[in-house]
Amino acid sequence: EAGVAQSPRYKIIEKRQSVAFWCNPISGHATLYWYQQILGQGPKLLIQFQNNGVVDDSQLPKDRFSAERLKGVDSTLKIQPAKLEDSAVYLCASSLIWGPRGNEQFFGPGTRLTVL
Amino acid sequence: DAKTTQPPSMDCAEGRAANLPCNHSTISGNEYVYWYRQIHSQGPQYIIHGLKNNETNEMASLIITEDRKSSTLILPHATLRDTAVYYCIVNFGNEKLTFGTGTRLTIIP
């Protein structure tokens, strides 16, 4: 079974520029998550989708971050404009169902963003 | 607001059992214990989860104390590929995963 795909794997931008990340979850997985992982810390959930609806975006900095999941499959995460503190690895994960087994999340390799 | 406490680092000799402890003294009756690990430069990987009973799968065993205030993840025969950061997470199963800083396990040849 194919895993969660993310692109690009690496991105370097200057502050105030815009950037977008793409995620393709495992086929059939209804729930999709975006996490931010700053160096030395555990991943932090930014947003969770159930199909194409948002379940939790309480930790998404909505003044600069946006995410969408059109047609309940692929998703994009955008940062506009980027700040230095946005330098991190952005991880996408998906899970088959909601509930205890739904916390068996499958993670992609992540996109490492460096903001200069 | 972490619900779990884990040692920051541990070493284990290759081929031996690695026992990773986790304290969750404030766990509620319906909260699950999840374990994930993150190998360098990769996304986290689900290992195992449990509620009250001990659990075993092809990767590891999870031992939960009777009072459920602590648990231990056991990797029975550690290999170099098990070197990773291991996260213990407690939640009700239908809420977001909150990762702490985990335990950095180093397998020594």
Image (cartoon, coloured by chain):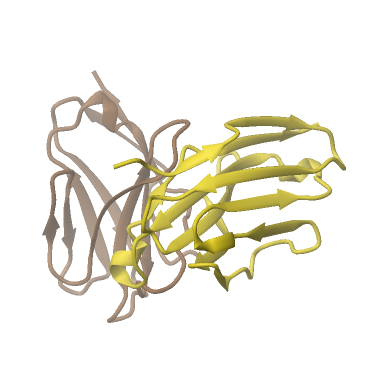
Chain colours: A yellow, B brown
Question: Residue visible at 68% across and 31% down?
Answer: A11
The image shows a total of numbered marks equal to 0
Q: Between residue A33 and residue B105, name the one nearer to us.
A: A33
Residue A99 drawn above or below residue A84: below
Q: In the figure, is residue B30 to the left or right of A79?
A: left
Q: Position of residue A100 (x, y in %)?
A: 30, 70
The C terminus of chain B appears in which quarter of the rendering? top left
Q: Is residue B1 visible?
A: no
Q: Is residue B101 visible?
A: yes
In the rendered image, the residue lying farthest to the front is: A71
Q: Position of residue B41 (x, y in %)?
A: 48, 31
Residue B108 drawn above or below residue A95: above
Question: Residue visible at 32% across and 58% down?
Answer: A104
In the rendered image, the residue lying farthest to the top is: B109
Q: Position of residue A29 (x, y in %)?
A: 38, 59
In the rendered image, the residue lying farthest to the bottom is: B29
| Quadrant in which residue A60 is drawn | bottom right
Q: In the figure, is residue B64 to the left or right of A69?
A: left
Question: Residue visible at 48% across and 64% down?
Answer: B2
Question: Residue visible at 37% across and 55% down?
Answer: A105
